[in-house]
């Protein structure tokens, strides 16, 4: 068992995700037919043998609580430790309202952090679609001797990439952080997943509190580098998507139709676990047709699909034609309806014969439970 | 701890008529209907009927069965005051211990387990039938008629009746005659192999039957006839829904094909869900040039070719230009590019390589011959497997 503790930020959703994050935070955003984004963080941790994971949440977390349950789907329901949900709790100096930055969120749960038994902590964003080998990253962290290691990836092709970059001074270390995507081509983009020595994390939280600082990169990490600290760098080669806008969300789902990307995320050695639903298999009717599509279990398809991502329990009635769509759980598409570039949230219904068309740059988002 | 009724599920049989598919695992965990294993049906029925103690009697090739059932969590049977219990044959102090020699003997050897729950009634189930039944309704009738034993019965075509235990009932619905697999059946009421016994009575008969060296220690052949002989009250519980014994290759194939007809059997009905243990797999992918109709597809599949009228379990891959028609593909099997699979059952993890041809459409639809490829078997490139042929390990040349 690695001497490593997991910590996931699930308190923040980018407002550019619009309607998609009204009923939830981005951590529980449905992705690729049957997953929620937080599954990637949790599974990466579970696959590395991490047993204790804290999830920092603040508001709109009902959907997330429902998804996580006891954590048993990620083998994180344990007699001691395991999954620990960290909603805001009243401390004498706590304030109400959204956390202004990561350091403020960490500070709000500092009693939990102070009690962490492990010597190192991995901090993971919950709006990433990535399958990380945290075991190898942890080895690299220990080998580098650095107190903090940043996981970097080539996000240049993917939307929503982080603006934080590190300029390497040796192939595996950096002493300089950049806050924009411009210049210094050799700089590596951070995916904002870090492994940090627990003692340093506690120190940075205390420093931020005393100095009224709220942000992880701009304040705490900048302070650490100013004091002469070194950041270890680990480069992750597989598919990585930061999902911070509707357009990121749409393109990341469409990316999953690409076999190479899909195999970067889903493979037998490090499976992505999710909450089970135990549905039936999917049925394709006599006149059904499907091309280049991903379909979860429990669907009933009598119409046509092309370049679509369908979640569990979707019903596509006779004559309906879906092209370039992302259709979430239990939605119903009426007979002869024609949808193109549509993101339909859970439990939506489209009436017979309806025609709805967005575009790849501006897909139409239909909010949860809406009947069109 | 006291329970009104507990279930005992007989899952130790070899399924010898399905030997090509059951050489490495017991029949009850045979993949079925895409997502399921046969044992999911009785287990889900128990859970849906509110029975939360299920003893599963195992004997033949139990490893996969044991790990499939696990804690019983997929069926919501992992409860504190009850649960699923795997019951293999065992040894007691001072005794030699022995294999289960018959269905009744299996329960006899587990009298201790049943007594632990102090039940009034015991439900006996077998692990090789596809059906949905509310056992609580059957129990209600058992109590109402103050029966000592209630046997679930279904009407079968008279010409098939000799495959079943057949019974005759009087005008009140009580059984007066029971014949196991009669040569000349006189009635079309077949036993479904589902019994509810008043435990005290059953225990007495099990102990007596054990003393009889001539007995085959079987419910149908011994226990029921001796209860009838002693004029105990045997009630017939009339069942009219879908029920199939999938003991042969053809009945297994036919019953899988029935899953396309919701009017026969509706897997999509959420009021009586059939649950299963899911493998951890991504959604299935349908390729750019795939054609797919009238088929059941499960997670983890990767379909590039043509799939029609077929049932695919999880993680099946179908290559480019491959054709799969009227076939059952079990978990993890792979169909190579250009291969043709017709009227076949392909076992778990079997490999059908490029341009191989397995099975054929029947000339006579009253005599369908299903080709079978066993688990982990290999059909090499360009090899041909005839209609009705069985491939155990390999066919063709590398």
Image: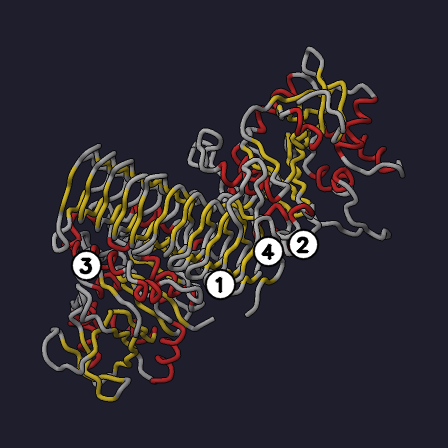
SS state under label 4: loop
CB under 8 Å between discs 3 and 2: no
Q: Which residue is mark 3?
A: A248
Q: CA distance from mark 1 to mark 2?
A: 29 Å
- x%, y% of residue A172? 28, 84
At label 2, counting other C-alpha atoms closer than 10 Å, the crowd grade (few under 14, some 14-19, many 20 or more) is some
Q: Who comes first in sequence, dot 4 or dot 2?
A: 2
> Share a chain, discs 3 and 4?
no
Between marks 1 and 2 in the image, the one whose residue lies nearer the viewer: 1
Residue A108 can be seen in this image:
no
- x%, y% of residue A260? 31, 66
CB under 8 Å between discs 4 and 2: no
Residue A56 can be seen in this image:
yes
Q: In the drawing, what numbered circle is on residue B353?
A: 1
Chain ID at mark 4: B
Camera-side residue of A24 and A33: A33
Q: CA distance from mark 1 to mark 3?
A: 40 Å
SS state under label 1: loop
Quadrant where the N terminus of chain B lies? top right
Q: Residue at x 52, y 42 (%)?
A: B75
Q: Picture quarter containing residue A85?
A: bottom left
Q: Which residue is mark 2?
A: B61
Camera-side residue of A299 and A223: A299
């Amino acid at each position: 068992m690695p001497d490593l503790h997991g910590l996931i930020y699930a308190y923040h959703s980018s407002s550019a995700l619009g309607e998609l994050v009204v009923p939830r935070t981005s951590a529980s955003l449905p992705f690729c037919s049957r997953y929620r984004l937080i599954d990637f963080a949790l599974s990466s941790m579970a696959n590395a043998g991490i047993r204790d994971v804290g999830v920092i949440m603040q508001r709109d977390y009902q959907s997330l609580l429902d998804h996580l349950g006891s954590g048993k789907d990620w083998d994180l329901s344990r007699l001691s430790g395991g999954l620990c949900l960290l909603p805001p709790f009243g401390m004498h100096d706590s304030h109400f309202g959204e956390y202004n930055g990561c350091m403020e969120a960490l500070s709000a749960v500092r009693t939990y952090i102070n009690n962490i038994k492990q010597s190192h902590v991995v901090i993971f964003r919950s709006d990433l679609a990535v399958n990380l080998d945290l075991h190898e990253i942890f080895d690299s962290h220990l080998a580098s001797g650095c107190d903090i290691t940043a996981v970097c990836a080539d996000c240049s092709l993917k939307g929503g990439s982080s603006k934080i970059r590190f300029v390497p001074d040796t192939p595996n270390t950096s002493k300089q952080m950049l806050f924009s995507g411009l210049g210094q081509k050799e700089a590596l983009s951070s995916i904002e997943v870090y492994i940090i020595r627990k003692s340093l994390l506690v120190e940075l939280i205390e420093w931020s509190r005393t100095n009224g600082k709220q942000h992880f990169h701009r304040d705490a990490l900048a302070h650490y580098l100013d004091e002469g600290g070194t950041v270890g760098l680990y480069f992750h080669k597989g598919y990585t998507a930061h999902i911070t806008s509707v357009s990121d969300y749409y393109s990341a789902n469409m990316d999953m139709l690409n076999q190479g990307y899909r195999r970067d995320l889903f493979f037998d050695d490090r499976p992505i676990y999710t909450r089970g639903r135990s549905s039936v298999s999917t049925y394709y009717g006599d006149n059904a047709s499907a091309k280049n599509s991903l379909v979860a279990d429990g669907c009933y398809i009598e119409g046509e699909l092309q370049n679509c991502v369908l979640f569990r329990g979707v019903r596509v009635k006779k004559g309906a034609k879906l092209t370039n769509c992302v259709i979430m759980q239990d939605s119903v598409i009426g007979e002869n309806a024609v949808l193109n570039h549509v993101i339909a949230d859970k439990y939506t219904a489209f009436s017979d014969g309806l025609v709805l068309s967005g575009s790849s740059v501006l897909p139409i988002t239909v909010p949860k439970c809406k009947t069109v | 701890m006291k329970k009104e009724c507990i279930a005992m599920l007989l899952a130790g049989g070899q399924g010898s008529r399905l030997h090509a598919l059951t050489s490495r695992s017991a029949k009850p965990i045979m993949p079925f209907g895409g997502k399921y294993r046969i044992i999911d049906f009785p287990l889900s029925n128990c859970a849906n009927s509110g029975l939360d103690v299920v003893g599963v009697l195992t004997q033949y090739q139990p490893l996969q069965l044991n790990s499939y059932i696990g804690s019983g969590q997929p069926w919501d049977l992992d409860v504190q005051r009850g649960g699923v219990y795997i019951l293999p044959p065992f040894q007691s102090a001072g005794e030699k211990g022995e294999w289960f020699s018959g269905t009744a003997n299996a329960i006899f050897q587990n009298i201790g387990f049943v007594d632990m729950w102090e039940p009034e009634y015991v439900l006996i189930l077998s692990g090789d039938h596809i059906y949905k039944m509310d056992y609580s309704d059957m129990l209600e009738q058992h109590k109402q008629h103050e029966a000592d034993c209630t046997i679930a019965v279904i009407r079968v075509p008279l010409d098939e009746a000799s495959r079943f235990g057949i019974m005759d009932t009087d005008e009140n619905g009580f059984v007066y005659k029971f014949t196991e697999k009669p040569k000349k059946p006189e009635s079309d009421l077949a036993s479904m192999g589902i019994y509810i016994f008043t435990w005290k009575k059953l225990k007495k008969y099990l102990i007596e039957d054990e003393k009889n060296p001539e007995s085959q220690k079987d419910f149908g052949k011994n226990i029921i006839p001796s209860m009838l002989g002693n004029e105990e009250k045997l009630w017939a519980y009339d069942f009219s829904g879908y029920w199939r014994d999938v003991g042969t290759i053809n009945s297994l194939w036919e019953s899988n094909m029935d899953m396309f007809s919701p009017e026969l059997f509706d897997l999509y009905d959420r009021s009586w869900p059939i649950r299963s243990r899911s493998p951890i797999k991504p959604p299935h992918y349908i390729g750019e040039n795939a054609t797919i109709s009238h088929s059941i597809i499960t997670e983890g599949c990767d379909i590039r070719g043509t799939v029609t009228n077929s049932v695919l379990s999880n993680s099946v891959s179908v290559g480019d230009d491959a054709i799969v028609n009227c076939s059952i593909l079990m978990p993890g099997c792979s169909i190579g590019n250009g291969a043709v699979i017709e009227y076949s059952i392909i076992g778990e993890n079997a490999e059908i390589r490029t341009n191989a041809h397995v099975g054929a459409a029947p000339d006579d639809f009253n005599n369908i011959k299903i080709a079978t490829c066993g688990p982990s078997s290999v059909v090499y490139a360009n090899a041909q497997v005839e209609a009705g042929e069985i491939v155990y390990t390999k066919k063709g040349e590398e």
